[in-house]
Image (tube, grey):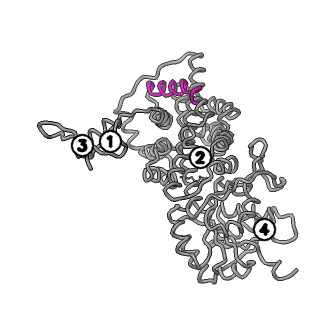
């Protein structure tokens, strides 16, 4: 064996839950890894996991105790993957790798949930010192181990180098059916199919797309929770009964990973109290920040991602537990209307359709947000490509993503998913039930902010006239903010002399 072949292919820094699993996934695909973590216990855990699974005679992961040692164990030019917390730790490690002697043609790939603007800054900051590339990863720990969805962005030179690596470890989709080719155990063969990894664009774009993925994830989760809540409160259904309904739905157009796990969760009992597990979990939702970033990003580019933002607010509202307990004693609501067997059956169908239509809207909002941001940032985004890599591996993976892929295949420049003939037709078919589900929940006093914000978005988007004309008049009244007229050239501004005795409309130059 020559010295060069004995060297490792990839340096891996950060062997926490995600890092360990990505490293093992790389090892399954034949890459020899030099691994480092500040916490040596994590290195040991990774080595034992590898030893338990490795069927070759050679170790697949080589432990390193310093950055200098790591660089020394790698083939040049070096390819180093970071799986460390977003923020300051990324710059800390990059600085230490510079000190350890990393070179201009070496590549560092950040796979954390970094803020996209930080990525743009870093790409500039490290230019000439090394090649800073990023790949946003979705799929949680199982995805990382057996096939995540990967959203790489940055310098095309680095992409050319990392592409075969990401294509090897990414989740795979059957190109004929668009269905995920599952691998859930290391003894199973590596699936062959279309990889869920595609180059997104210049620095920052991959993390932007992942941020929006998470915004959609928030909406998807909140909408499932609203469906559960209406069934639980309005229809007095037990968690087990709702689990059965979710399982049925998972066999149809609502098939998705989040639907599947929600059904699994609702079947679980607390070993201590024997109550349904969901009933002993405190109803305060946490968040790490990516949903908030999406909502802020939407406000910044003027994208009406109302359902995504509402889903972030729903988590915030849930955390006001003490205030809610007090308010529950003071504030009144309606009495829940009893339903007979047929009404209950109809209502379950209406909730299904509300979930489906709201989901279409949440995705429409997410893609519209990416489109507006891409225009502002000058990113040449392939929307069909994004839909394709979300078909498997990621948290929002769903059969439905194939329909989005088809929509962008029909029109790669689609302005809004709702304008696609298939989705327009689907909403036309199911909107009656969508409205009924929201009406029932509202009359019963059960909150369904994500469903209703999605419907309000749909109704606003399809209106050729909105009351923004009155709003513009109000602005002009108190602040002389001017308005345009429907019957005059666009861009021409007018103002009414509201406070003058004799009102006049003046044209503003
Ligand atoms: C994924 C997930 C992952 C993580 C989020 C959720 O795509 O694998 O989105 O990134 O689970 O950080 O975070 P919060 O719900 O805690 O905000």
Q: Where residue 273 appears, x then y in whole percent?
A: 59, 39
3D distance between C-alphas at marks 4 and 1: 62 Å
The earlier-in-sequence mark between 2 and 3 is 2
Q: CA distance from mark 1 to mark 2?
A: 29 Å
Q: CA distance from mark 2 to mark 4?
A: 38 Å
Q: Is residue 443 magenta?
A: yes
Q: Which mark is on residue 484?
A: 1
Q: Are marks 1 and 2 in contact (CB under 8 Å)?
A: no
Q: Name the disc covering residue 495, or none.
A: 3
Badge 3 crowding class, 10 Å Cα cut-off, few under 14, some 14 to 19, many 20 or more, is: some
List the residue tagged with mark 4: 31
Please state which of residues 166 and 97 is positioned toward the viewer in this rendering. Answer: 166
Residue at figure coordinates x 34%, y 39% from the top left: 488
Q: Which residue is mark 2?
A: 413
Range of magenta residues: 426-444
Label 1: which secondary element: loop
Q: Is mark 4 within 8 Å of ligand 1?
A: no
């Amino acid at each position: 064996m020559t010295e060069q072949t004995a060297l490792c292919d990839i340096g891996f820094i950060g062997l926490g839950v995600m890092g360990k699993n990505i490293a093992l996934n790389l090892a399954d695909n034949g890459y020899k890894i030099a691994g480092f973590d500040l916490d040596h216990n994590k290195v040991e855990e990774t080595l034992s996991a590898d030893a338990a699974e490795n069927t070759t005679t050679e170790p697949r992961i080589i432990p390193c105790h310093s950055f200098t040692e790591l660089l020394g164990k790698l083939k040049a030019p070096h390819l180093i993957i970071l799986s460390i917390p977003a923020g300051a730790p990324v710059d800390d490690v990059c600085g230490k790798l510079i000190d350890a002697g990393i070179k201009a043609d070496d590549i560092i790939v950040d796979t954390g949930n970094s803020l996209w603007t930080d990525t743009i800054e870093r790409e500039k900051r490290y230019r000439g010192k090394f090649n800073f590339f990023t790949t946003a990863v979705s799929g949680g720990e199982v995805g990382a181990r057996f096939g995540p969805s990967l959203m790489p962005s940055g310098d095309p030179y680095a992409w050319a180098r990392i592409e075969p690596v990401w294509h090897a470890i990414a989740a795979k989709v059957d190109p004929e059916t668009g269905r995920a080719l599952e691998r859930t155990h290391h003894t199973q063969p590596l699936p062959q199919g279309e990889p869920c990894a595609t180059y997104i664009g210049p620095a920052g774009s991959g993390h932007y797309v992942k941020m929006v993925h998470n915004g959609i994830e928030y909406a998807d989760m909140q909408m499932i929770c609203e469906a559960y809540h209406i069934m639980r409160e309005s229809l007095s259904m037990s968690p087990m009964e709702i689990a059965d309904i979710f399982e049925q739905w998972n066999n149809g157009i609502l098939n998705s990973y989040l639907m599947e796990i929600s059904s699994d969760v609702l079947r679980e009992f607390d070993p201590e109290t024997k109550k349904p597990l969901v009933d002993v979990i405190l109803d305060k939702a946490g968040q790490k920040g990516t949903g908030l970033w999406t909502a802020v990003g939407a406000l910044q580019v003027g994208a009406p991602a109302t359902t995504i933002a509402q889903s972030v607010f729903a988590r915030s509202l849930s955390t006001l537990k003490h205030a809610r307990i007090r308010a529950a004693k003071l504030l009144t609501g309606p009495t829940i209307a009893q339903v007979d067997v047929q009404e209950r059956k109809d209502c379950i169908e209406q909730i299904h359709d509300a979930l489906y239509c709201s989901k279409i809207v949440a995705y429409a909002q997410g893609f519209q947000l990416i489109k507006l941001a891409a225009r502002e940032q000058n990113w040449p985004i392939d929307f069909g490509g994004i839909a394709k890599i979300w078909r498997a591996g990621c948290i929002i993976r769903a059969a439905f993503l194939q329909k989005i892929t088809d929509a962008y295949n029909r029109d790669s420049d689609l302005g809004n998913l709702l304008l696609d003939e298939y989705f327009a037709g689907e909403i036309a078919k199911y909107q009656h039930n969508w409205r009924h589900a929201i009406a029932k929940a509202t009359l019963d006093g059960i909150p369904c902010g994500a469903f209703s914000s999605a419907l309000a978005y749909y109704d606003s988007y399809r209106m050729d006239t909105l009351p923004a004309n009155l709003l513009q008049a109000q602005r002009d009244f108190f602040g002389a903010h001017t308005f345009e007229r429907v019957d005059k050239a666009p861009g021409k501004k007018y103002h009414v002399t509201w406070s003058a005795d004799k009102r006049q409309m003046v044209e503003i130059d």
